[in-house]
Image: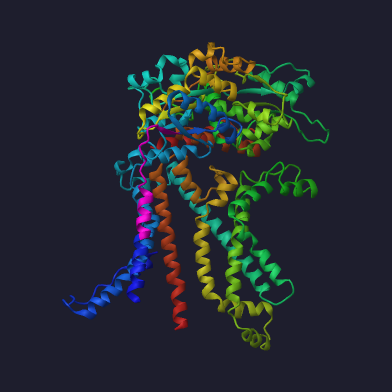
Amino acid sequence: MKQHRRAIALLATAALGVTALTSCTAAPSDDEDVTITWWATNLASSIQRDEEILTPILERFTEETGIKVEFEVNTWADYYNKVLGAVSSGEGPDVMSVGTTWTQTLADTGAFLQLDGTRMDAIGGADKFVPASIAAAGGDAEGGPSFLPMVNGVTNLWYNPAMFAEAGLTEPPADLDSFVEVAKQLTIDTDGDGSIDQWGLGYPAGSAQELSHTIFAFGRQYGGEMFDKDGEPTLDADGIVEAAKSLTDLMAAEGIVSTADVESTQSQDMYQEFIDGRVAMIWGANPVPAFRDAGFEDYAPGYIPVIEPLIGDPIQTHIAGVNIGVFAETKHEEAALELMRYLTDVETQADFWNELELLPTNAEAYDSGAVEKTEAFEIYSDILANHADTFPLNSKTGQAETLIGDAMKQLFARAALEGPLSEAAIREVLEQANTQLIAAG
Amino acid sequence: MSTLIQEARPSTPAGPPAKGNQPTRRRRRRNVLPYVLVLPALIAELFIHIIPMGLGIWIAFLSLNQLSIRNWINADFIGFTNFLNGLNPTTAIGSQFFGTLGRTAVYTVLVLGFSWALGTAAAYFLNARFRGRAVLRTLYLLPYALPVFVSAIAFAFMFNQRDGIINKILVDDLHLFADRPFWLIGSNAFVVLVIASIWTTWPFAFLLQLAALQTVPEDVYEAASLDGAGRIRQFFDVTLPMIRASNVVMLLLMFLATFNQFTVPFVLFGPSAPSESLLISPLIYQFSFGTWNFGLGGAVSTMLLVLLFVVSLIYIRLVMPKERIRRA
């Protein structure tokens, strides 16, 4: 009896051990048709909407090539850490979408295939891309880029034409001073209860990410860059300090941005404010899907203002969007490159514009009849061509984005509590961020 | 954790076993079974706790960032550099570390003090028999049953500057302030952090104190009241000494949990907390996942581990042995 019980116990333990082992080593079976995996990112108004848009596009790919694609749409929050997890473990999908600002850092990890001549030919050659787009994806890298641009986006101004008409205005002015004057006329107490309930500009001043992108663009207007010519961090450059002063003053000195906006941690908060009629203008990257979902129609695209006289370059936005790369650990390189080719072909690129309003990176797509050339399309392409620049391509860009964003968030919080900040106070905070960036190694 | 391993380690037999000695072999065979049975748990423990902890300490000595993470085994070994960076108060990182450590200590004292007082007071009053006691007991445990994440989100909504209920009451209804104050930025953020943490922590104290109070026999109180001691006097001279043993353990547990608090500040403030309310665990998160300096994050984690270990050790040496002596 005792013997039996012991034998059963041993067997059970052994069985448990074996199940544990086999579940770890389930090997992929070699089918005739290849299935590759793709980590996509959220681009539509919801993950579900993304899936609805991508499914038919990928079905067409399977029909054409016989390659099946299993895709997963990731939200941006914490996606970078998920990508780093894949980089460190070597366990990841065959193809990955990444943010344009992460390009250089991720390329430097060596975890993505460099697209040399042969691989680039398989995708259709570097010439198929808009030169600025492929350059922003690291196209000039020695040995070929690790990423290709899939779609591009820009941040631009959106205004409420009804509110403009009511205030006797036609459209937002192009220079910052006139912009502030117009925004002041739109900052009003509509119901007469003594407190302002319509603000000229809505800005998510609690979002470190948005702030890092805005300070990049405005810093460039004042001639400030986040890295110097040798690639050393200069988050406390004069131009950046002046830009930070001018941005925080929009809230603290000019009073065209509500101080409550420092508690807004994402751009979507401002889209909602805009839809609810609490702000007359916002700066946003493709809020149209959110407007459509809400059945909101009082919007028109415009340009983010530029300082006058201009000290640096007329930059209004970084070149945003999504880059795609092939994970170096892939066992299906050919199929992965095939997907890269397909995603950047004219037809697919036209779909991305028509469904998501994200700009093509394929040069031919701009002349193709498949792309619906709306007013937004003309404005976005003009901004991309004349008022956008690549977010710095530096190994430390990822850290710089976090640190300068956090610093700006801190500055806006202080501006909301204490009023206009002195340049010295701003410089001190930015200097600290810069020291941390240098120490980040 | 460590006791598990000690228990599981087979005891070596005193001498070499004699060959063909039936009873010894049988005993040995019988001895093997328990170890085989705990083996899966032991392996799981090794992989889930021991190895990651060891790795966490190991990376503190590496120059490990997002560039070297792909091949992290070969990341440069840099000795104590990460620790020195964290400990040098003249650098940006060092001054941030020490400032945060001090703030976390103040935070811990406040949360621990208020939670203990609230929990003990509630337990003491609910230990008496009266109608509706069960309802109140359940109600008081509610914050403990709610996920901390949910409570913290509720606090973030309540303390929102523009639409939060706190400002609605203070400004719109009571007219205590002319302008709506900010609660989640600036120095007020620390106050909100402490309040939200007390809310999530005190039911734990309440629960343990209630259990401890039920072990105090009724007749001790009867004797005390015969001697003329009132409710308050009874509490300090009878109750507290009699529940001391459980108090000692509870305070240690609460101290460790509060000092390591991450969820409440992270949910309230997001990945980058206002500098006035930055605690040590969110700082480690910022080092590791904000600037992807895993080495520095590992070094600060290790220092935190050592610090809490030493404090716990001193606490146990100072407080716990007396209990044992008294009971012996």
Task: Residue A269: tell me if it is visible.
Answer: yes
In the rendering, at what x and y percent does residue A238 appear?
Answer: 51, 25
- Give the residue at the far left of this rendering: B19
> Looking at the figure, which quarter contains the N terminus of chain A?
bottom left
In the rendering, at what x and y percent does residue B133 appear?
Answer: 70, 72
- Viewer-side residue, B87 vs B57: B57
Image point (47%, 29%), residue name: A101
Q: Is residue B231 above or below residue A157?
A: below
In the rendering, at what x and y percent does residue B232 appear?
Answer: 67, 77
Image point (50%, 28%), residue name: A58
| The magenta segment | A15-37
- Viewer-side residue, B311 vs B205: B205
- Viewer-side residue, B159 vs A269: A269
Q: Is residue B116 above or below residue B179?
A: below
Q: Is residue A180 left or right of residue A86?
A: right
How was this image coloured? Answer: rainbow
Residue A25 covered by magenta stretch: yes
- Give the residue at the far top of this rendering: A367
> Looking at the figure, which quarter contains the C terminus of chain A?
top left
Image point (66%, 31%), residue name: A271
